Image (cartoon, rainbow, N blue to C red):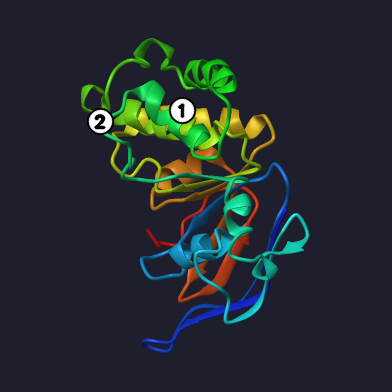
Amino acid sequence: MIEFIDVTKTYEKNAKHALQHVTLGIDKGEFVFLVGRSGAGKSTFIKLLLREIDVTSGTVKINGYDISRLTKKEIPYLRRKIGVVFQDFRLLENKSVYENVAYAMEIIGRPQSKIKKKVPNALEMVGLAHRMNHYPSELSGGEQQRVVIARAIINNPQILICDEPTGNLDPDTSEDIMNLLTRINNFGTTMVVVTHNQSMVDRMEKRVVTLEQGVVISDESKGRYDHGFF
């Protein structure tokens, strides 16, 4: 599903290696935590997956295809296969919950008949069908994050990237969000979660990939993670 093959990314401005010779594979349907200190290379990893930036050397593949070969016109089609959940929600304040989720379908030209069918189903899945006519300002932080997740999965992405999805949430709400992500993963969506929440990583017992100064220093399938990098 996702392959990083000897990937190095250097930012020319400061000649810093954001990633150094990273080789990593993530299988279809896998749930992986990506952890490490600030500046470890996590954001660069995500940007490379989304083709927001290009590798300096090496290869990034999705479904066996080298995404560096994509033209600018083809990149939006790649991103349709990848849902993204951000820490800061990025909801449209002047649109209702329904409209925020529907917007992700509208911008890729989905017909209204399909939108009217799929949006309520997505909101039902995240437990917000009863709030579809409310606006972001009327929702709690946990509810807003559920809207973000519904928006991210509405186009049936193969991969869901979650960048600190519980960073602004209390522990109980964070657990609810992670349970929701687990349910989505159980339907076959490949999950990559960037987080600093050590207790959550310990509790989930999923695969944990640790970056430090752009290098993969640990790749553990299960069990307690406690290297003090949070």
Residue under circle 1? 102
Estimate the x, y position of residue 180 in percent, counting from the top left: 50, 28
The kind of secondary structure element at disc 2 is loop
Q: Residue at x 42, y 27 (%)?
A: 176
Which amino acid type is marked by label 2?
A: Asn
The residue lying furthest to the right in this view is: 64
Q: Is residue 132 above or below residue 36?
A: above
State how many labels appear. Answer: 2
Closer to the chain start, of discs 1 and 2, is 2
Q: Position of residue 111 (x, y in %)?
A: 58, 26
Examine the rendering and report whether any part of residue 46 can be seen. Answer: yes
Give the percent coordinates (x, y) of residue 146: 41, 28
Q: Residue at x 27, y 28 (%)?
A: 136
Residue nearest the viewer, comparing 14 with 23:
14
The image position of residue 99, as x and y in percent, is 39, 25
Q: Secondary structure at mark 1?
A: helix
In the image, 69 versus 139, the foreground residue is 69
Q: Amino acid at mark 1?
A: Ala
Do the residues under discs 1 and 2 have CB atoms within 8 angstroms?
A: no
In this rendering, would 119 be left or right of 156?
left
Is 40 located above or below residue 206 in the figure? below
Residue plotted at (22% across, 22% down): 138
Residue, disc 2: 94
In the image: residue 21, left or right of residue 18: right
